[in-house]
Image: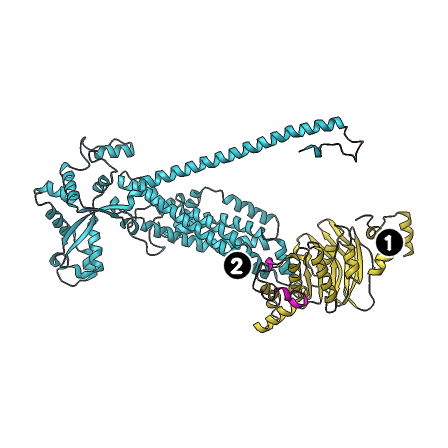
Chain colours: A cyan, B yellow
Amino acid sequence: MTESTAPTDPRSPSGPSSGSTASAKEKMQASLARRYAAEKRFQAYGIGAIILALAMLVTLFVTIIGSGYTAFVQYTVRLDVTLYPQDIDPQGTRDPEVLARADYQGAINDAMYSLFPDASGRSARRDVRALVSPGANFVIRDMVLDDPTLVGQRISVYVPLATEFDQILKGNIDPAVTMRTIREASTGIPWSLPPGERLISENQGRYLQQLVRQGEVEGSFNRWFFTNGDSRQPELAGIWGAAVGSFFTLLVTLALSFPIGVAAAVYLEEFAPKNRWTDVIEVNINNLAAVPSIVFGLLGLAVFLQFFGMPRSAPVVGGLVLTLMTLPTIIIASRAALKSVPPSIREAALGVGASKLQTIFHHVLPLAMPGMLTGTIIGMAQALGETAPLLMIGMVAFVVDIPATPMDPSTVLPVQIFLWSDSPERGFTERTSAAIMCLLGFLILMNAAAVLLRKRFERKW
Amino acid sequence: MKDEQHSESAQEHAYPETTAGKPTVEDNAKVSARGANVYYGEKQAIKNVSLDVGAHEVTAFIGPSGCGKSTFLRALNRMNDTIDICRVTGDFRLDGEDIYDRKVDVVQLRARVGMVFQKPNPFPKSIFENVAYGPRIHGLVAHKSELDEIVHTSLERAGLLGEVKDRLDTPGTGLSGGQQQRLCIARAIAVSPEVILMDEPCSALDPIATAKIEELIDELRENYTIVIVTHSMQQAARVSQRTAFFHLGNLVEMGDTETIFTNPEHKLTQGYITGRFG
């Protein structure tokens, strides 16, 4: 805005007088300053909002990682276990069935007693036994099942410590703290243990110190967290069962919702006549996208479980319910993607004599695919994080076994997080955070896959 | 004709009952329309138009924006069918065959009457695929070598082969605007149409690219019948043998290009070609 624009227009002498032109210039400058100020303000708001959002994100990550990273480490104790054939496999058949049902606890106990020769008497021995996780039994059983020749040998094996000792070594709980304090702190409900009863006995504290001094205790990568299903013992509880359940659920959801959603979108967008019926359908689909997800859970309970008698807690039913939930998202995104394909492409195809179906399948659909995939991934991510509708169809059950098929009872990652967050033990608290990290990791992976897939498509077309 | 002259003197902008000039041809009509009307919902976009397009001629449709020339062009290969609210009445014939007959397959019709659009719209595929698509979907080729041949001849006829023969597998969308439009022409002629409809094919191109396309149109006339809609009167004068002037849905005047541009019968035509309105 310099003088060059200010002079009166020579072509219109009858226009505004030169006096009013000068004031127009001043007015314009004043308004310009206001406009720039408004722009600056708006930028400041934007930057402020982004900083705030980032700060919240950082807080979230710091909190979750801070309380959850210890779950990836498990303290173990080295035991020299002698597997006497007469205890484990008296007949000597080495039948996996027999080996699976055999009792390895005796061998573990013997190994523990040998570490503390001075611990005599029932209560001292009980304290010694309690140092090791009750799940050590299964650790050794699995080793033997993998390699039956171990029977009859003396093996050196690291077995998990019981969760209290694990948590003490991680520094998550103070050994002096009582069970009562922990329960009350986490639940807010007065706990009816006798006051002063400790989480661990004095003897156990001594034993633990002795083990650490002797170098028998080792903190190592917690593989059980990634290979086990749920468990009552925190040190044995893992996410694998829930992860497999989530996988089956999403598989069913994807297999149903993607083809149905895309087909519905193509029909509504390309073939359906524009009349009152299609309007009604469109409004309904848009409304369905906003229906609270628990309603779909109720529907699943009433229709799939009650009416069709499908199995409770099964990923296949979860997948069906989540399909209902994801369909509107996919249909809406797919229709938007189809709409965004330039009409010139359709005309070009029709112009060389392609039929309507050929136009859609050869040209429109491939161009819309990246957008459809984005919608589908968003829907899948929603489904992966969904908890409420799955509670209604019984996927909230305590399931220890890893599901082998979508028909087996199972839970899913977010429900597993929900279940663990309900448990007062410190071992479950850290696992809750660790499971959240895994869930977020899966979401990031899914999104990365979607981006890659889209890039691929876009390059090809 | 006499009546018309009278009414015109009474009211300058009155429309003729019949079209001025010579809208029909005697013996070599390739496409003919009689009493054609096109409606978009309530609005009538084409009002009772009758004309012939001569074989192996370039016929230009000129007229101000919104006069219905593109609409009429799109009626000739039933591209208007894709618009829900569009309704076409009247008699359209290609080689004497009613193209709006129930028995006519619109897919086959569009293979016979190809189209080139205003904005170059190559498929987002390779140059080769762009040209090969038409022959492939119509099942014109039995094996790869035939397809190669069709693609090469089509590109050659469109005057594009020399520029792209080393990069047939690169995307068609990576070409320049003029090259893209010639690619679209190659795509149209790959299915061996009889008529090629061109809807302002040069409006998005620079003068050099335009000159190339115009040259191409002149060459294509030997083998194809061409109808071109254009905003440029110079272009119409340069490339066409016959010209039709549309105004507000009416076919005001049609005749030999030379006559239209040098000695128009109708006042509106005169006004338009001398640039007094439009």
The relative height of residue A8 versus residue A443 in the rendered view (above or below) is above
- Which residues are the magenta region? B155-174
Q: Amino acid at mark 2?
A: Lys
User: x and y percent of residue A9 in the render?
Assistant: 76, 34
Q: Residue at x 81, y 50 (%)?
A: B275
Which mark is nearer the camera, 2 or 1? Answer: 2
Q: Give the quarter of the figure containing the N terminus of chain B.
A: bottom right
Residue A393 in view, yes or no: no
Q: Chain of mark 1?
A: B
Is B82 colored magenta in this rendering?
Answer: no
Dot 2: element = helix
Q: Nearer the viewer, residue A183 or B53?
A: B53
Q: CA distance from mark 2 to mark 1?
A: 54 Å
Is B160 colored magenta in this rendering?
Answer: yes
Residue A371 in view, yes or no: yes
Residue A460: assigned label: 2
Q: Amino acid at mark 1?
A: His
- Marks 2 and 1 on same chain: no
Mark 1, residues whose alpha carbon is within 10 Å: few (<14), some, or many (≥20)? many
Q: Chain of mark 2?
A: A
Q: From the image, tell me which residue sits under label 1.
A: B266
How many labels, in total?
A: 2
Indicate left or right for A394 with A235 as reference. Answer: right
Q: Residue at x 11, y 47 (%)?
A: A113
Indicate left or right for A91 with B83 as reference. Answer: left
